[in-house]
Image (cartoon, coloured by chain):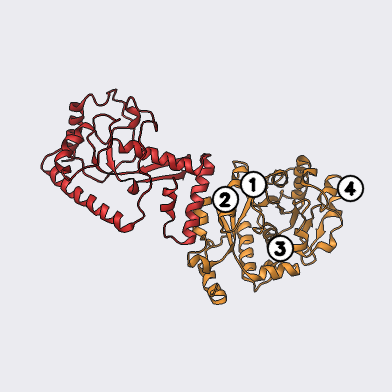
Chain colours: A orange, B red
Amino acid sequence: MQEAQPAYAAASATVDRPLGRAIVITSGKGGVGKTTTTANIGAALAARGASVALIDADVGLRNLDIVMGLESRVRFHLLDVLEEKCSLDEALVRDKRMEKLSLLAAAQTREKEDVDGEQMRALVERLRERFDYVLIDSPAGIEQGFRNAVIGAQHAIIVCTPEVSAVRDADRVVGLLPTDWRPELIINRLRPALVKKGKMLSIEDVDAILRLPLLGVIPDAPEIIIATNRGEPPALDPNSPTGSAYRTIAAKMAGEDVPAPTAAPKRSFFARLFGGL
Amino acid sequence: MFGFLARLFYRSSSSETARKRLKFVLLSDHLALAPDVIDAMRAELLAVIARYCDIDPSCAEVGFEHREQGIEMHATVPIRALTGRQRPDLKVVRPSAQLSQAAPVVAAEAPASTVASELPGIEWGTQAPLLDEEPSDDGAERKSDETATGEKSAELEKSAVEGNAAEPASKTLPVTRKKHQKSGRTYPAAPSSTREHVNGERSAQG
């Protein structure tokens, strides 16, 4: 399947293919699912036929490799490339399931301050010449690591759980992004049964407060934990409801017309499965 | 000070509580004002209005909305009656049972359109005695209060029909959207022109 190119990525005279789209996945707050989201959107986009590079920008707390199940293949990392200790090709880990999906792991024993912003920007630019999508997994926080993750990107996806702390941090992070960006929102770990009982912020609540275009909603499900245990992104499991939500997001990113995300169809399914929650 | 918050959260679901807390904290973040400062601003705003009009602070709504061009503050303050005080530094007098007789004179001297910033001798928040900020959480009591207001409203409207210059009660006063009228007039010097204004408005309505 040929991937639709984003219209604004088409202007590139020096290479024979249009530059890919670099997207930072960020949240401000830690533990809301940035890494899981990056892994799954990357897998879903690659499964659609797009070439995808994932960059783990969380230097010192490398995790994207283990979530993807690629930890045993990592030989070189982001800082090795930036410091020219290896070539980009040597450091890119090809996914064992999909040829078009590659990972650039973070350095585990280094610090975020070791990354030079301009070198990072240049690296993302190089990856955009070769891949349709460059997804950058941002570290939590709003300091140097966050700035390094944002510097080469043209677009941001904000991951937010329906909790007051996550929403507040998401709002803060949006304020730190370039003002001409229009970040998109993914609401993660929604529990429709709790929303129905008035015990959790709804999609509409988060939407009304953050006022960002809604890219997708991921239901909270134990299968994410199991999939992470195994290093298999649920986006590749055709029977997984969370996988289906990630595939819908990938379709939307590729320019497909998908229905607006709601909790309604999932609610009945989850009511059956987790009615007691 | 937290009475406003307490009322917001009174008997609501936890997600509703979360939503309201978030809205408030984000507003505070965006305005770079501490939540209790926003509460104080609201209390002072209502206190200034209460110096000229009889209002029930527990029925007043002061809110903020995000617009394209920034944050907009809006206030909806139901006015029970005008207090008829001639000097802003006098103590607020609650309307008595004889309200319907007193109201016409009152309306002429203190029109609802008076904007606090036009008035000389007032320093925002310094002279204004802060209202009793703690609203009653007793729903029944508040309801009966509203019912009483409704009765007053009926009385006032009746007197208005009979040709008096009473303002209808419960008229809402959108504070921030009101244009400042640069009349150059000093308060309370010109009751006659004010009366004309009120009468003119009334005849235009009739």
Residue, x 52% and y 47% (percent of image)? B26
- Badge 3 marks a residue whose secondary structure is helix
Q: Given the image, what chain letter belongs to the residue carrying mark 1?
A: A
Say if mark 2 contacts mark 3, CB within 8 Å.
no
- Badge 2 marks a residue whose secondary structure is helix
Say if mark 4 contacts mark 1, CB within 8 Å.
no
* Image mark for residue A85: 4
State the CA–CA distance, disc 4 to disc 1. Answer: 33 Å
Mark closest to the chain's N terminus, 2 or 1:
1
Mark closest to the chain's N terminus, 4 or 1:
1
Say if mark 2 contacts mark 4, CB within 8 Å.
no
- Badge 4 marks a residue whose secondary structure is loop
Spot occupied by residue B76 in the image (x, y as percentages of width and height): 34, 44
Report the front residue among A145 and A122: A145
State the CA–CA distance, disc 2 to disc 4. Answer: 40 Å
Q: Which residue is mark 2?
A: A168
Q: Which residue is mark 1?
A: A8
- Badge 1 marks a residue whose secondary structure is helix
Left or right placement of residue A168 versus residue A104 in this view:
left
Quarter location, residue A234: bottom right
Residue, x 33% and y 27% (percent of image)? B118
Q: Quadrant of the N terminus of chain A?
A: bottom right
Is residue A95 shown above or below B183?
A: below
